[in-house]
């Protein structure tokens, strides 16, 4: 009888392995900067339906954390950079943060928190040393607070760093070392992570490499061996991920930490907001990435594959666009959990869309057929609409960038109308607009195949997620960067079409 039960147990474990894949599941980033967020319970079901077993949150969002309770999904919980100064100032504040956002959700909701990610790319050169003096002390205080809470073994610490913290003078991965201006600081953090059983987290973005360098060989960003190999001794590198990751490993080896665990915290490809951000390239990139994960493929320097968190799960229409309009379009899924493109997730399974999403009425706000594109109020109306709604799909080379002047205005009006929950007064633009029940999205042909006139999620039909309380650590801080400059550029594009 004992053998029979053992056989049944092994069969169940084997079946579970087939269901989830030999890789043990996927990992992704779940951002929550959206005007009409997908309900957290639907997101968690979406994660589980598609084999995601790990997720990274950028902040302690109550709705997301509660929904992740007893889900079987492991959580990396982020701490925003604006919290670092307060957390670095005294361990008492760190203890309060851990109690409210870690201990509470583990004990009360059964959330499986495995890592605390202290800061997010705090040493980016664009931050101009803003977080140099606070990141390490904040990390130390969070670790001390976890130990005091009895969570030191269960929950580990990490610091997500951008790949620009290391470099190579030889142009080859084997020449990797940490940036000279932060070398000693990074090594102090790495030693602390090593001493406390933590991991180093690095964010790798082939898309941004392509954006930054017009001479960057595009094929090198992908995984189908279409690029000319970069030969480094006995190793040939055919993609950015392997080369970049191994540059980091070389830097660790050079400085005495050859075995420190390294996590890829963010990697992905956006679908809109820039000519290089499109559905075809995003599908090619993410399918290649998923294929590596399913196959359990590591890199030349580390054969055991790292945890790789895909960036991101869902589009975020309220995210800062300071780096570029593409920032709102990193999601594998649209804002509502619908599929952008097909992805094979292994074992003959395809990625599936979210279920149970409730929408506002099937109606849109468009430019009135009787209104003129030469109306002097049109430019100001478009500017107003795009100041309060997401018009990033209208930019040059974007999914709706080839619309004519009238459709441009209609898109802007509709995004404002939907963002404002289809209020009657939200489709009143100086007698230039009307509502319609006919979908104004362009026909699927040419460059407009992915241009959609959206209808937003009806939040009133879903159970409302708990509102995020003001943080005792960083109360009063603005959550979103100003979009004035970007919106002004978009208006210039729209005006140019009107003039033409």
Image: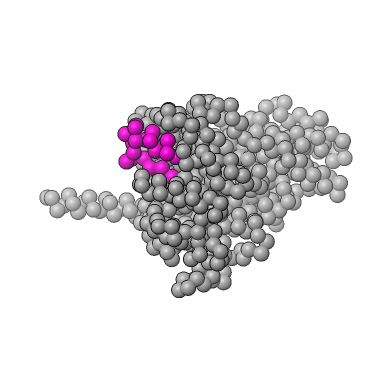
Residue 406 on image: x %, y %: 79, 43
Residue furthest to the left? 1
Q: Is 117 in front, or is 143? A: 143
Left or right: residue 124 compared with residue 404:
left
Residue, x 38% and y 35% (percent of image)? 144
Residue 173 on image: x %, y %: 50, 64
* Magenta region includes residue 144: yes
Left or right: residue 480 compared with residue 500:
left
Left or right: residue 323 compared with residue 231:
right
Q: Is 18 in front, or is 77? A: 77
Give the color scheme: rainbow, by chain, secondary structure or one colour: one colour
Q: Is 492 in front, or is 340? A: 492
* Residue 169 visible in the picture: yes
* Magenta region includes residue 104: no
Residue 110 on image: x %, y %: 35, 34
Residue, x 59% and y 43% (percent of image)? 129
Residue, x 42% and y 39% (percent of image)? 140
Q: How many marks?
A: 0
Q: In this view, does 106 lie above or below 114?
A: above
Residue, x 77% and y 37% (percent of image)? 382
Q: What stretch is highlighted in magenta?
A: 139-158
Q: Is residue 227 above or below residue 374?
A: below
* Residue 355 visible in the picture: no
Residue furthest to the bottom? 234
Residue 483 on image: x %, y %: 69, 38
């Amino acid at each position: 009888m004992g053998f029979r039960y053992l056989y049944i147990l092994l069969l169940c474990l084997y079946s579970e392995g087939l269901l989830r894949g030999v890789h043990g599941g996927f990992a992704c980033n779940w951002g929550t900067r959206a005007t009409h967020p997908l309900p957290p319970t639907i997101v968690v079901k979406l994660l589980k339906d598609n084999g995601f077993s790990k997720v990274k949150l950028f902040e302690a969002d109550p709705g997301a954390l509660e929904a992740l309770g007893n889900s079987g999904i492991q959580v990396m919980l982020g701490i925003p950079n604006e919290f670092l100064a307060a957390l670095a100032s005294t361990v008492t504040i760190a203890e309060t943060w851990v109690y409210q956002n870690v201990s509470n959700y583990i004990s009360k909701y059964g959330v499986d928190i495995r890592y605390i990610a202290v800061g997010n790319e705090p040493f980016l050169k664009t931050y101009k040393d803003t977080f140099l003096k606070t990141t390490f002390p904040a990390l130390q205080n969070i670790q001390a607070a976890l130990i005091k809470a009895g969570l030191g073994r269960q929950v580990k610490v990490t610091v997500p760093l951008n790949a620009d913290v290391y470099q190579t003078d030889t142009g080859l991965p084997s020449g990797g070392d940490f940036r000279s201006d932060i070398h000693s600081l990074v090594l102090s953090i790495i030693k602390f992570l090593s001493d406390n059983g933590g991991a180093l987290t690095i964010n790798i973005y082939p898309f941004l490499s392509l954006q930054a360098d017009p001479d960057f060989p595009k094929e090198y960003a992908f995984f189908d061996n279409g690029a000319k190999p970069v030969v480094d001794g006995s190793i040939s590198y055919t993609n950015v991920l392997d080369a970049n990751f191994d540059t980091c490993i070389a830097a660790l080896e050079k400085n005495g930490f050859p075995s420190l665990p390294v996590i890829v915290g963010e990697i992905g490809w956006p679908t809109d907001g820039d000519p290089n951000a499109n559905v075809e390239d995003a599908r090619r990139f993410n399918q290649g990435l998923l294929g590596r994960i399913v196959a359990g493929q590591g890199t030349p320097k580390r054969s055991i594959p790292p945890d790789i968190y895909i960036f991101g799960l869902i589009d975020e229409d309220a995210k800062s666009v300071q780096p570029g309009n593409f920032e709102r379009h990193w999601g594998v899924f649209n804002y509502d959990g619908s599929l952008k493109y097909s992805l094979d997730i292994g074992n003959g399974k395809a990625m599936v869309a979210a279920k149970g999403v409730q929408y506002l009425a099937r109606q849109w706000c468009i430019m009135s057929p009787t209104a003129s594109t030469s109306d002097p109020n049109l430019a100001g109306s478009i500017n107003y609409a795009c100041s309060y709604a997401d018009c990033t799909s209208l930019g040059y080379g974007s999914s709706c960038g080839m619309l004519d002047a009238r459709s441009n205005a209609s898109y802007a009006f509709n995004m404002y109308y939907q963002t404002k929950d289809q209020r009657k007064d939200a489709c009143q633009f100086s007698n230039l607009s009307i509502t319609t029940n006919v979908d104004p999205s362009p026909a699927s042909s040419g460059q407009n195949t992915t241009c959609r006139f959206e209808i937003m999620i009806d939040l009133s039909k879903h159970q409302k997620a708990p509102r995020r309380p003001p943080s005792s650590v960083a109360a009063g801080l603005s959550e979103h960067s100003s979009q004035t400059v970007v919106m002004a550029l978009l208006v210039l594009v729209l005006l140019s079409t009107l003039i033409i």
